[in-house]
Amino acid sequence: MEIHPILYLYSLLQWILDKLLSPTPPPPRARLSRPRIAIIGAGLTGVSAASHCVGHGFDVTIFEAGGVKNLGGIWSRVNNTSGLQIHSLMYRFHPSIKWSSGYPDRQAIVSQITQLWKRYELQARTRFNTRVTSVSKDQQGRWIINGNLRDKYDGVMAAVGSCGEPKMPHMPNQEAFEGEIYHSSKLDGMTAQGKRVLILGSGASAVEALEFVVNTGARLTSVLARSDKWIIPRNALVDSLLAFNIFGQETVFSWIPESMLRIFFYRDLEDLAPDSKGLFTETPMVNSDIFHQIRRHKAEWIRGDILGFTEHGIRFNHRAKGVPKGGPGWESVIKADMIIMATGYQRPSLSFLPDEVFREPYAPPNWYLQVFPPEYVSICANNCTYVNAIGTVGNYHIGIYTRLLLMFLIDPLARPQEYWMKKWIDMTKAIKSRAPTGAFDFFTYSELTY
């Protein structure tokens, strides 16, 4: 069997990363003597963080609100047709992960999470069907989960992520529609073969819906978008270069990548590129297929406002480019056989954490390194305070933040004081004071250098 040289080099790189950076799994039924850590959530972040902890001799308990079928977090609940839109080189949530393709699907991702969970003997350290409702401190400064005084921890890792249950809003006259209505995450077993499909929304959930309609042969697909959104190609080099913006915000040089995208990626569809919204202000849509489908007249991107449902489709207010949401336009009914609600997911709550971590002006995401509340350096909210970024939540930063927490727990001299944590937050706000978003509302990987 012939092996592609690029794939061989990628496999070799992954093997080297595993040997150099992966902590050694503990022996079966090992008693770990270093500080105990409660990890809340058994998704990608929770499993990865737990494997780093036990690999360095720290005992952990993973608390998962759902059953074992929820292992893998959001990836356990999306469609089988879903997969990575950004290259797997930027989705290395643990050094031992071994991808066999550049853009693995949902099943491959869940398989890697499950293998990691088993490799580090985390089965006996996971409590399924255990929702965390409170995290509090005892008189000795140890953490108590759900008021259980017999079970205490030295550190807490919140790993509930940023995507919870599907968000399914009810729109005016929705019950009158005679066709099919689905959330973008509930498409397994469905087909769009020969159908006229409307996708309501233009974010990551719309990517999920687009994968479905392309794979099942829809006759025509329309993406109904309330606002213009940057679309970047599914290209590892391009995505990596964009993530190298060390300032994590719009700069005087942002026009360069924006112009390059318009010229070489949008090309004849430049009208779809935002005029007033910078590339480094909001998470872009990563998809190379939407423009291909538009050029083949299999899809269209329509800008405007949804006014409500009719028996046969959507009442829609079309807006010209540059007209704000709710602005003047012209109304029509866009007919459909199937409507896919690409309306995203509810953000999981962090309300189980102590009340004092939510005090302004140091409420999330305005925390030390975005993940450590300045009041408690022994709490790390890994991937929970993410808002917008160019990059992924499933990359090397999980291990960096986890190891920082471990270092803070065992080395008092390494622990930053609350005063200096707040000063770092203030400094970052000052550096990004001219950003069109909040200082911590958008970031790139390169920002982790400071």
Image: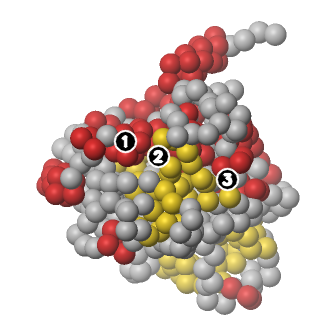
- Looking at the rendered structure, the kind of residue marked 2 is Pro
| Image position of 412 with respect to 23: above or below | below
Residue 261 position in % (x across, y down): 40, 40
Q: Residue at x 42, y 39 (%)?
A: 403
* In the image: residue 348, left or right of residue 437: right
Count of marks placed on residues:
3
Cα separation between marks 1 and 3: 23 Å
For the C terminus, give its image quadrant: top left
Q: Which residue is mark 2?
A: 35
Q: Are marks 3 and 2 in contact (CB under 8 Å)?
A: no
Task: Choose the circle earlier in sequence order: 3 or 2.
Answer: 2
> Comparing marks 3 and 2, which lies closer to the viewer?
2
Residue 371 position in % (x across, y down): 37, 54
Q: Residue at x 56, y 70 (%)?
A: 148
* In the image: residue 207, left or right of residue 437: right
Density class for disc 3 (Cα within 10 Å; few <14, some 14-19, many ≥20) is many
In the foreground, 148 or 79: 148
Q: Which residue is mark 3?
A: 126
* Residue 108, numbered label: none
| Image position of 317 with respect to 97: above or below | below
Q: Is residue 196 visible?
A: yes
Q: Secondary structure at mark 1?
A: helix
* In the image: residue 426, left or right of residue 9: left
- Looking at the rendered structure, the kind of residue marked 1 is Ile
Q: Residue at x 47, y 46 (%)?
A: 35
Q: Are marks 2 and 1 in contact (CB under 8 Å)?
A: yes
Cα separation between marks 3 and 2: 17 Å
Q: Secondary structure at mark 2?
A: strand
Q: Which residue is mark 1?
A: 410
| Image position of 358 with respect to 239: above or below | below
Task: Choose the circle earlier in sequence order: 1 or 3.
Answer: 3
